[in-house]
Image (cartoon, grey):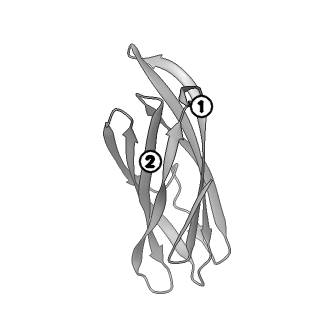
Amino acid sequence: MLQQITRGIKITVKTSFEGTFYKNYKMQFAFAYTITIENQSKDSVQLTSRHWRIKDSLSRIEHVDGEGVIGKKPVLKPGDSHTYQSGCLLSSPFGNMSGFYNMVNFATSNQFRVVVPTFKLSAPFALN
């Protein structure tokens, strides 16, 4: 489990390996991740968008941008948290993800970024 705090917003990440399957005649490795976003600041904030950098051990890099997380743009009052689960596919049994959330502070109307720490994705059977 990884944790990081940016401007009073705490991000916690947990990952799991979900299995392998073939897609378009290629082996794919499926990973899930659970992220908790906790507002430890004194102001209400809203997550508006996200950016992901997904890299596998074959040095393939994919960038993903989108609104909100899993179709939601959560508003977090001080002390509130939002947890969601999502996943990704890799072409190799190892990789990592990193990124950020774009947020808006309701008290100041200022936008800011919350860093999601780099988290590793690894299939347990591939470890020594």
Horizontally, is 62 left or right of 17 in the view?
left
Marks counted in the figure total 2
Vertical relation: 103 (above or below) 107? above
Whole-Å distance between the Cαs marked 1 and 2?
17 Å
| Along the line of sight, the residue nearer the viewer: 32 or 104 | 32
Disc 2: CA contacts within 10 A as few (<14), some (14-19) or many (>=20): many
In the picture, the quarter occupied by the C terminus is top right
Q: Residue at x 59, y 34 (%)?
A: 17
Residue topped by disc 2: 97
Mark 1 element type? helix
Amino acid type of the residue tagged 2 in the rendering: Met
Q: Residue at x 39, y 13 (%)?
A: 25
| Along the line of sight, the residue nearer the viewer: 87 or 75 | 87
Mark 2 element type? strand
| Along the line of sight, the residue nearer the viewer: 28 or 85 | 28
Q: Residue at x 41, y 56 (%)?
A: 99
Horizontally, is 105 left or right of 38 in the view?
left
Residue topped by disc 1: 124
Asked where in the image residue 43 lies, by quadrant, the reply is: bottom right
Vertical relation: 54 (above or below) 39? above
**Residue 98: % across, % down:** 43, 53
Amino acid type of the residue tagged 1 in the rendering: Pro
**Which-is-in-front pick, marks 1 and 2?**
1
